[in-house]
Amino acid sequence: MLVRHLRNGVEESVHRGHVVEVDLSGRIVRAIGDPEHLTNLRSAVKPFGVVALLEAGADRAFGLEPAELAIMASSHSGEDLHVRTLQALYRRTGISQANLACGVESAPLDQITATRLARDGERPGQIRHMCSGQHSGFLLLCKLGGWSPEGYWEERHPSQVALRGVVARAFRTTPEELVMGIDACGINTYAFPLREIAWAYGLLGDPDSIPSSDPRSSLAPHFRRIRDAMLEHPELVGGTHDRLDTSLMKAMPGRLVAKGGAEALRSVGILSGPRGSGAPTAATGMAVKIEDGDGFDRAGSAATIEALRQAGVVEGQALRTLNRYHHPTFADSHGRLAAESVPEFELAPIGELVR
């Protein structure tokens, strides 16, 4: 049990889940629950998907800007900022917005933008979908490879073959061994144990620490570019209004690279630096998963901030800034405090060596 939801002190529901933190050798540092819990990456795959584009030579062909890399790694809120960034990319590279095939479900996520569009009688297009940045990367891959964008989301399309190859390398396996499903936006998603997800994000946070003997060392330059782009443009990774990934990276600039996935997965690369009152600590990776999918969007944020607090990463002013995520509160129709979600767990130091 990670989070309790209370109304006037009465427990209305509980949220169970798993948390694991690993060092850059894959050794478990702290955990609660099952570090081997199999979890779909969903949108947490997006930063790794950008690697396929960089490996294909997109920098040489298009001179991609950090903001463009950040939005292709994002689950953005569909605000005008995100639309302008993507439209500028389309104009400069010659790809067509008309080829987007991510759908319009829940677009835009940002309620202020959604209200304005509804007021003005404007129907949101696919460019406002949270996955349009990722799908734009696939369209760029098509342009680079000379492939038709028709059906770019299908498993056998060369753009998806390229994605599988990079995901397999980032997670120490082969494309044939990947555990796959279909994501809501139409492309494949990939399942891994939480420990592997935390490890991959730790390497994304500190790619310079990948040893040359590790096959993933060839990915390090691309990891570095993507990490730096996300750190430089956190508002493009999520949004400007209450998006946890964005808020984490803004509250801890240069210390955390964060990306969530649907059904309450949160993945964090923790860069090296001081923790608590102690000496600087090497980089680690953390993954948090709420078992029930967190349909009310409260337990995942509370558990993530609490786990980072216990790890000595988030404290002081940053912790105060993130308090609305750490202890989410809920008001009644008159604005009175009615309920709150409270994280209650203790991460255990483990020190287990990966096989």
Image (cartoon, grey):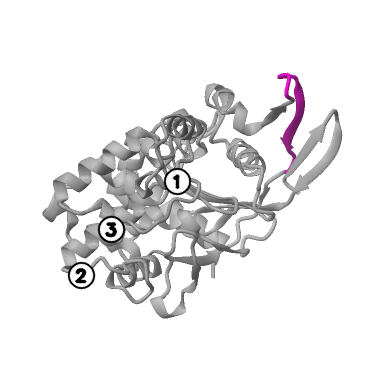
Q: Nearer the viewer, residue 211 or 112?
A: 112
Nearest to the eye among marks 3 and 1: give it: 3
Q: Residue furthest right?
A: 10
- Which residue is disc 3 drawn over? 99
Question: What type is the residue that disc 3 sits on?
Answer: Asn
x, y percentage for residue 224? 30, 48
Answer yes or no: is residue 206 visible.
no
Q: Judge left or right: residue 96 versus residue 301.
A: left
Nearest to the eye among marks 2 and 1: give it: 2
- Which residue is disc 2 drawn over? 147
Q: At x 34% / y 38%, what residue is drawn?
A: 82
x, y percentage for residue 195? 55, 60
x, y percentage for residue 223? 32, 53
Question: What type is the residue that disc 2 sits on?
Answer: Trp
Q: At x 69% / y 53%, what residue is drawn?
A: 17
Q: Earlier in the sequence, mark 3 or mark 2?
A: 3
- Quick one: SS at disc 2? loop
